[in-house]
Amino acid sequence: MLQIRDLIWGLLFIGFAAAIQVQITPAQGEISVGESKFFLCEVVGDAKDIDWFAPSGEKILPNRPDMFVSRSDETMSTLTIYHANVDSAGIYKCVAKNGDKEAQATVQVKIFQKITFQDAPSPQEFNDGDDADLVCDVISSPPPTIIWKHKGAKIQAAKDVRFKIMGNGHLHIRGIKKTDEGMYNCEARVMARGEIDFRMIKVVVNVLPTIRPRLLDVNATADIGSTALLACDADGFPEPTVTWAHNNIVLETGDKYSLNEDGSELLIKDVKKVDEGDYTCIAKNKAGEKAEEVSLNVFVQPKITYLNNQTAAEFDEEVTLTCEASGDPTPAISWSFENRVFTEGEQSLDRNIVVRSHARVSSLTLKNVQFTYAGLYLCSASNSIGQDDQLMYLEVRYAPKIMGAVAWYTWEGNPTNISCEVEAHPGASVVWFRDGLPLPHANVTNVKIYNTPTVSYLEVSPSQNDFGSYNCTAANMMGTESKEFLLIQAEVPSAPGIHMVEPFSSTAVVHVREPESLGGVPIIKYKVEWRLPGREWTSKEHDADEDLTKITIVGLKPETDYEVKMSAMNGKGEGESSSAYSFKTEPILSSEIPPSIATTSMASREPSAPKLEGKAQNGGNVLKVNWIKQDDGGSPIKHYLVRYKAKHVSDWKPEIRLPHDSDYAVLSGLEWNTDYEVHVVAENQQGKSEPGIFSFRTAVEPTTIPDAIGGGSGLGTGAIVGILIVVFFLLLVGVDVTCYFLNKCGLLMCIAVNFCGKAGPGAKSKDIEEGKAAFTKDESKEPIVEVRTEEENTPNQTGGPTEPNETTPLTEPDGKTVKDDNTKGETEVKNATAEVKTVPNEAPQTNGNESKA
């Protein structure tokens, strides 16, 4: 075996020694553009040189940038083509030489372009409605065939004219829609090589924003710290960004403006008039931008900017008050004084008051100035969003004017006060004269003078010679005024008249006429006297109210003859009695008696219903209900039952029980402008009467002009609550301290005993005094007994000072009251009728004298 191999190699050696052979591997070469490839040239035989030649015939030198030739040994050389391009194609030749011997071989190199996507971006974005050109640039050799697919299906331009595959392979979509959005497949094929490649391209269709302002016009009020919200909603794809602009300036969040997260809401803080105008809402995305205008209308509340106090003198030709106000809309300005309202134009028949307005200014002209024009004038500026009110004071200077009654009545020894009421500005000084001499003087000792800012009182304790004329003279810088006053001797009143007597079975109503002569001083009381013919007179006095026209006599016997007469009393004394008036009480009629009682007893029955009268008090929401006792049915009245309700509701207020001698009740806390119904029932031992019924309507709640507008509003609700809490706490502490020192109890006592180990201070022993409670305590653990030794009387409370009149002594300058020397120290206890004031939804309370044991 070894011999055969050696033989073969020997033959080959001999053959090659005779000739050189060259072989290129691979024999053919196909290179894709951009690829690199090498070729191996193998030489059989002894070759000194091995060279490569390019298709152009030139020798390929070593170390070229695009081609590289290297010889690894004596029999082998390598050609490497880097990054081949179309210029690299051709026939390459490898030549081997040894002396005069030469051999060569060639190789055909072909360059082709693989499928290459030069430009196929993803995503590709288009605007809704635009003509879209989907880019897919592909190269290859030979050129490829382009196929487009969408949603897995091949796009066939013949079936949808909106789609067209262009010569450059692009896909053209006419009027692209949002529904055309998605993934598109650009596929390239080279049939000769069976080569295929594709790219997925995402197509995005952007939609131009749309804007919907929530309100095209927004209203706001300036200068009250308010805010205005402007809002617009924007749609589009991609989601648009929203910005706001005003006067071509883009607004940003800060002290003045605030934007929400997506910018759709613009909040304008502390709105001012300068903020008024159009605001632009701008929505922007890749498809473009859209803008809409939103108008902000800023209104300004009225504000009075000019109003000053004025001064004039009486009888001046005229004085003009001026009021200026700002606001938007332009405010209307009006004037008011006391209960009169003045608007544009003539305001009085005598043309003395004229109002003129122009733009934001109004003037009130008062002609022929009178002293009654002085006072507070209210200027009101109002528009559709508010009102401003301010007060100004018109000062009118005028000479003194003496007012009041001329004649004053009294009697000897009874002090009286002659009042000289002076109206003047500036204030006037007052001097009294008697027979041309100023008072008081040395010859007059029974006269005193008391002065107030508006009234001078001359107190006279008259004797026979003091009646007559007195002069009051008032003077100020504007002038002087005098007036004569007459002090006249008063007389007792004449006899009152009895117009008629309205008899019942046990009562009689006397209709009274006022005396023809009052004696110069008011009637204080009326005295009514009645009797059985030939018997002694029974009398009762009644206070002389202004509306007293009827007096009821009670406790009469049925079907009995009586006589009645009356007299009047004033400060000087009691006048003559009227002539006796005879009447006869009515019998107890059987028709008035229920059958159940008539069969058992004709002597007594239920009382008749009382007759009711009512009079509004305190402005109209308080009612005083008076009733006149009628037939008591032969049995004394035990009490009266009063109840009332508003007519529009079904529930009655809690029933009020009043004593038998009551003749009125005061209903307070009533609702304004409401119809009410009152029932009063009389009850005796036999039962209750039918109700006496009285209906009435309360007055409309009065309105008042505020004394000052725009001033401080006083304490707030929180401050008042805080003050009340502090007062309540201090009160609790005071009570606890009192209990600690007096009764050895309370919180302080508990702390002293439990924490300090000390007992509270011992209670001082008390003497038992008349009219006071005596408390005793010993160690026997017996209950403490409170002993009352005398009834406690409730003093009469007048509720305030009394206005002086002609029979009331005034207070001395040192503050002491002038007292009558004959005043007695005893207190007369009278059985007065209780006045019951009721409050809705509360039980009635009665003030009276009570004894406690």
Image (cartoon, grey):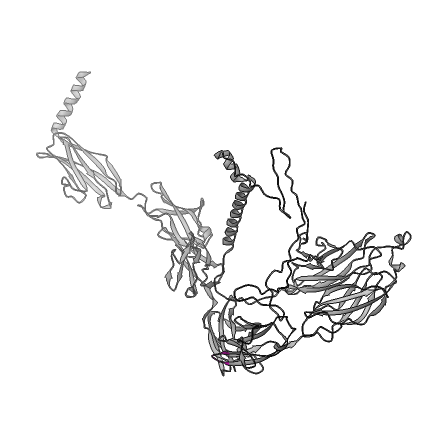
Query: Which image quarter: residue 59?
Result: top left
Of residues 810 and 270, the one nearer the viewer is 810
Residue that lies at the very extreme toward the front in this rendered image = 443
Looking at the rendered image, the quarter that the C terminus falls into is: top right
Horizontally, residue 176 falls left or right of residue 347, namely left
Query: Which image quarter: residue 678?
Result: bottom right
Horizontally, residue 71 falls left or right of residue 667, namely left
Residue at the spot 49% in from the left edge and 57% down from the top edge: 715
User: Picture coordinates of residue 360 (x, y %)?
Assistant: 47, 74
Above-or-below relation of 83 to 408: above
Of residues 430 and 723, the one nearer the viewer is 430
**Dominant secondary structure (helix, strand or loop) of the stretch shown in magenta:** strand
Q: Is residue 343 visible?
A: no
**Residue 122 included in the magenta stretch of the image:** no
Looking at the rendered image, the quarter that the N terminus falls into is: top left
How many marks the image carries: the answer is 0
Query: Which image quarter: residue 604?
Result: bottom right
Above-or-below relation of 399 to 165: below
User: Picture coordinates of residue 487 (x, y %)?
Assistant: 62, 77
Above-or-below relation of 166 to 272: above
Of residues 338 and 140, the one nearer the viewer is 338
Q: Is residue 402 visible?
A: yes
The stretch in magenta equals 475-479
User: Picture coordinates of residue 340 (x, y %)?
Assistant: 57, 74
User: Picture coordinates of residue 523 (x, y %)?
Assistant: 70, 70
Horizontally, residue 572 falls left or right of residue 108, namely right
Horizontally, residue 13 falls left or right of residue 348, namely left
